[in-house]
Amino acid sequence: MNKITRRTFLKTWQIAVGSIFAMMTAPTIFYWWRDQPNRPKDIENWIDLGKAKKITENEWLKRPISFEIEDRWKTKAVQEMLYIYREGRNVTILSSICPHAGCLIKTGNGGFICPCHKSFFDDKGTVIEGPSPRPLDSMEWTVKKGRLYVKYEQYRSGIKSKEVIG
């Protein structure tokens, strides 16, 4: 019969405790790895903006929106601002977030101004001057049964291409 030494006992004990710990944490690590926080449950996140005909024509309208983002553990209420312009049946919806550093833009001087780094955009959202790498981000929209819906998405700031982050 083999004699158990202190060294073999400690090695066996470490392997046993390590295996138990790995089995207990594996599900948590798996769900953490697969989870995408701040990602809407429904990727087609259409938000109702009201009756399309009630949107003032040929004038930028500042419209607050709110929605919920769910991940595995919590629901978070988000409030954002959009700029809406209607010309007949054509609608333009722009994000109020500056593509340069994520500051909130304001209307002024016949266009939009970012107060943080002085980017200036014309009335269509095109960059006129400043450090912004791209125009203001436009949103996809649709009209269903006379109501205007916007597919709200957030884009990564500071890069030339529109890259959706949520």
Image (spheres, grey):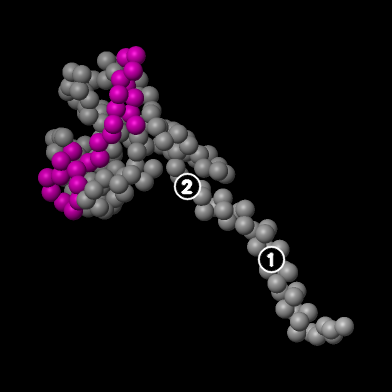
Viewer-closest of 81 and 148: 148
Q: Which residue is mark 2?
A: 36
- Residue pictured at 25% horizontal, 52% vertical: 159
Quadrant hosting residue 19: bottom right
Binning the other alpha carbons within 10 Å of mark 1 as few (below 14), some (14 to 19) or many (20 upward) gives: few
Q: Which residue is mark 1?
A: 19
Name which residue type carries label 2: Gln
- Region in magenta: 125-151
Q: CA distance from mark 2 to mark 1?
A: 28 Å
Instruction: Point out residue 145 in the picture as x, y percentages from the top left corner.
Output: 34, 14
Report whether 144 appears left or right of 59: right
Instruction: Point out residue 49 in the picture as x, y percentages from the top left corner.
Output: 35, 24
Name which residue type carries label 1: Ser
Name the element at disc 1. helix
- Residue pictured at 45% horizontal, 44% vertical: 38
Q: Quadrant of the N terminus?
A: bottom right
* N-terminal-most mark, 2 or 1: 1
